[in-house]
Amino acid sequence: MTKLSQYIREASRETILDPYEAAKILKKECRQYINEAGKSVFDLYRGVDNAPRIAKFYMMKKFAHTEKRTPRDTLKKIHKYFNNKFEDIFGWPVRNGVFVTGSKDNAESYGRAFVFFPAGKYEYVWSPKIQDLTGHFEEPEDEPGLSVEYMLMHTEKDIDKILDTYIDTDLKRAIRSKSEISFNCEYYYIINTDIDYPTDDFIEFEKKILK
């Protein structure tokens, strides 16, 4: 049994190996995203931990579980603070969203980079000026001891100005910017496109999506 077949056997039934079947699913369930992203449809990535590094096509369905997200790089108190602010602006807890980026390198810092397709209706939020909100508030090297929590307690007006740079439109520009983008969606698909020798059916898969 190959590593891939073992992985598929143990994984969810929502794993798709056939590029033709995958194209049909995406065209049907991700129509809004395909239309909005246009030619950038394969340029949005999500880093995934513990994903099999196999140079074959496969696609997996993932559920967002947005309301239960645990922050990976942000203290819980700060995570909650940002979410309260974003809910006031956009009506949903943006820091609980599914994070993706137009930068494959940045996505790979969180795991293996997969192409991302949000399904059904979705919302998204990003900033043209801030690539990574947590990183933006990292402790300056020349001011040791200045924690993120300290900054939140003492510079709220400045932080509000930064949060005011976030918008929920212009997806193509968001992808090009390589900023982090938070998606609010019920579920999404991630696709392995790191293939050593793209087959004819994979090439046809890309053409079908881009039609």
Image: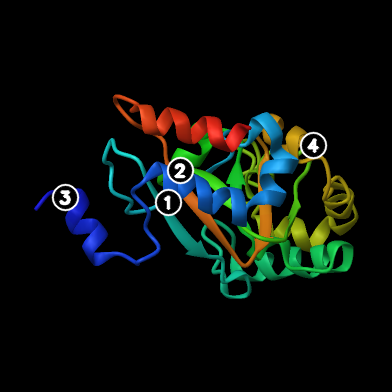
Residue 58 spot, x, y in % from top left: 36, 46
Task: Give the left or right position of residue 208, taking residue 122 as reference.
Answer: left
Are the residues flagged by discs 4 and 3 in contact, CB closer than 8 Å?
no
Return the disc, 4 or 3, that comes first in the chain's sequence: 3
Task: Give the left or right position of residue 7, taking residue 107 as reference.
Answer: left
Of marks 3 and 1, the one in the foreground: 3
Identify residue type, mark 3. Answer: Lys
Q: Which residue is the site of mark 2?
A: 114
Identify residue type, mark 1. Answer: Val
Query: At x 87% / y 50%, what residue is drawn?
Result: 158
Identify residue type, mark 4. Answer: Pro
Q: Is residue 178 above or below residue 191?
A: above
Instruction: Name the foreground residue: 69 vs 31.
Output: 31
Is disc 2 surrounded by few (<14), some (14 to 19) or many (20+) residues within 10 Å? Answer: many
Residue 80 at least partly seen: yes
Are the residues flagged by discs 3 and 1 in contact, CB closer than 8 Å?
no
